[in-house]
Amino acid sequence: MKKRIIFHIDVNSAYLSWEAVHRLQKGDDVDLREIPSVVGGNEETRHGIVLAKSVPAKKYDIKTGETLFSARNKCPNLVVVPPNYTLYMQCSSAMMEILKEYSPAIQRYSIDEVFLDYTHITDHLGAPVEVAYKIRNRIKNHLGFTVNIGIGSNKLLAKMASEFEKPNRVHTLFEDEIQEKMWPLPVEELFFVGRATASKLKSRGIITIGELAKTDVNYLQQFLKSHGLLIWNYANGRDNSSVRNEKPPMKGLGNSNTIAFDVTEEETVYQILLALSETLGMRIRNVEKCAYVVAISIKNHHLFSYSHQKKLDVPIDSTNMIYKHAKDLFNQAWKGEPIRHLGIYLSSLCSNDFCQLSLFTADESQNRKLDGAIDKIRLKYGSNSIIRSCFLNAGINPLMGGVISEEEYPMMSSLL
Amino acid sequence: MKLLMKPIEMIAWFTKEGVPTPIKYRLMEDAANITIKVDRVIIRDEEKLAGNKMFIYRCQSILDNTEKIYELKYEINTCKWFLYKW
């Protein structure tokens, strides 16, 4: 079999550079990428964290995910711009359009990351590195933002390569380069080694990726279980996942919301759960699934999170049933303290083609018809065209959760 | 030329393919409307920055007996015209 060649295209500080290019096109005379700036949420509704930062902002030690308050403390004249998810979709799609010209096998891994299978294209378009430079330049000249392109013999190596030096670079990482380029890196740089795993490894003296690669896999599995085998394979540059044009199968779905104020009253919580159920119900019906497991999560005013879940005998997809079970779970779990963040999650999905009738639950056929009609109205006239009367003057958004309600926004998957 | 990006009112003609050509436009200057006729489109270019498609026109008009070269922009998404550079 021919040796695989995979590209990983990663937009440099995506949200920020897209906003910067957009503003320049609209006649702004400041390039956000050249000043200390961040894309951040709205502090008034308590979504005030750094979503993306410019290179000059990085010099002030501003980190993605920290609060805008602490970011401003580090850099008083920091420019903060709000996120614009519709713009991000537009930029990402324009980039996809260019990439489609180079291979039929393309996977949009997240809004700003794309895998491209170049294996059999070499004969037609030329050497991989040259083509990567061509793609990089085209994106920069036509779309105005910079990307890093990693080239490797599988998706993992390509992804690791694109992380090397930024911005606007092309790197390769083939099997014979692993020892030289990847093994000296600290272990937390490896894909899938997060904070928790990194500290477990470090406490056992495994500091670099190379050391991880040379560790006995049985020993890793003793304390990391199957995840140990996965990262050991990754450390050795082994990954055989294919560049998927379609999305991996959905295992579960959820919506959550950070509320603009601390909620202390049950009534308000119920309304928020209902608003989340509305969004979630529409989504699960849209993918034609039913869920056996409902879970809720609560984050309190001390930023402490806990969750509660239950398995149902009969799978559900109706807004009312999701709401009912979420409410029950909430009543069982809530300790009575002020709440900052609420979420509902559905998993153990099954197809909604056939549904098991139950003697002990109410007839769902009326509910199904109603949900179907509401979904159709919302699809045709917009998601706020029909809302429940309890949300009138409630000051609560009748549909909660998600970044863009109208459009499908590609979130990063945990699978390569 | 200085970057302005000022919204303007425009009369334009469109080809069958949907490509517009500017004819005459009006802008507010010191609380008064000024109407300018586009005498010649020198170059038409297309840009796609941030995935947002725009046509850029380098144009020429006679103003106070002098020849002036400037640039106009048309944003396809919003159907808005701008005086881009003056």
Image (spheres, grey):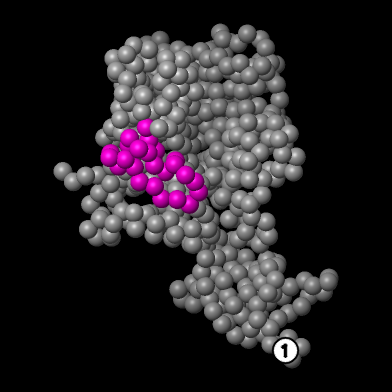
In percent of the image, x 60 and y 19: which residue is there? A299
Nearest the camera: A248 or A214? A214
Question: Which residue sits at x=42%, y=43%?
Answer: A162
Describe residue A315's horizontal placement relative to residue A390 as left or right: left
**Residue range corresponding to the magenta coloring:** A159-183
Can residue A353 be seen by looking at this rendering? no
Residue found 70% across the figure and 71% down from its top: B2
Q: Which residue is mark 1?
A: B66
In this picture, residue B34 sits left or right of residue A113: right
Query: Relative to A380, is A62 above or below?
Result: above
Q: Is residue A260 left or right of residue A237?
A: right
Quadrant for residue B30, please give it: bottom right
Query: x and y percent of residue B57 in the render?
Result: 58, 75
Residue at coordinates 65% horizontally, 69% vertically from top-left? B84
Q: Residue B63, how many percent across, how many down?
A: 73, 86
Q: How many marks?
A: 1
Q: Is residue B12 above or below residue A399?
A: below
Q: Is residue A163 magenta?
A: yes
Between A11 and A183, the one nearer to me in the picture? A183
Q: Is residue A109 magenta?
A: no
Q: Quadrant of the C terminus of chain A?
A: top left
User: Residue pushed farthest left?
Assistant: A1
